[in-house]
Amino acid sequence: MTLTYSIKFLDYWHLGSGLSAGAKLDSTVVKDCDGIPFVPAKTIKGLVREMALELQFDCDFIDRCFGTTSDKDDKCYIKKQKLTSARCYFANATLDETTHGEIVSNKLQDNLYDVIAFTKIGSENKFNESGKQIEKKGIAVDSQS
C-alpha cells in the first residue's frame, strides 16, 4: 500500500539540519543540492511514529512499521528485544518538479529565506550582533564590527 500526502505551510516554517550557523540561526535549513528546502524523511517518520504513539496504536504495529527501539523511555521498548528494521518507507517531502524547476531556473532560491528574528545580546552576556563571543580578562565587552 502506498500513501501519498501533501504538506502545506501556512506561515513561516523552519526545519533545522542540526548544523550550527552562528548567531543568525540556531541551525541551518535543510536544503537540496539546488538550495531548495525539503522535509527530510526521518522527520516525517518520527512525527508519524509520535502520532501513532499518541493515538495509542498497538506496539506490535509500531514496531513493524517503524522498527523496534532501544530507547528505554519509549512506551514500546522491551528489554533485550532484538532490534528490527522498519517495514514502512518514508520519502523526503519535496516541492513538485514544476515549482522546483521554476525557482531554480529563475534563481529565486534566496527569496525562500528570511531572517525572522535577530537578537543582540549586550556586554553582560558576552555576545555581540555578529555572534562572536568576546571576553577580555573576565570582563565581557561589546565588539564594534
Image: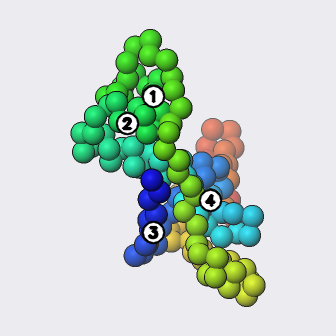
Distance CA(mark 3)–CA(mark 4): 18 Å
**Label 3: few (<14), some (14–19) or many (≥20) C-alpha neighbours in 10 Å:** few
Image position, residue 28 (x, y; %): 62, 58
Look at the numbered discs 3 and 2 and tell me whether their residues touch, using CB distance below 8 Å. Answer: no
Is residue 35 among the parts visible in the rendering? yes
Question: Is 10 situated left or right of 91 in this image?
Answer: left
Secondary element at image label 1: loop
Distance CA(mark 4)–CA(mark 2): 27 Å
Is residue 111 among the parts visible in the rendering? no
Name the residue beneath numbered marker 3. 6
The amino acid type found where label 2 is placed reads: Ile
Secondary element at image label 2: helix
Say whether disc 1 or disc 4 marks the residue closer to the N-terminus: 4
Name the residue beneath numbered marker 2. 62
Image position, residue 91 (x, y; %): 56, 55
Q: Residue at x 60, y 52 (%)?
A: 17
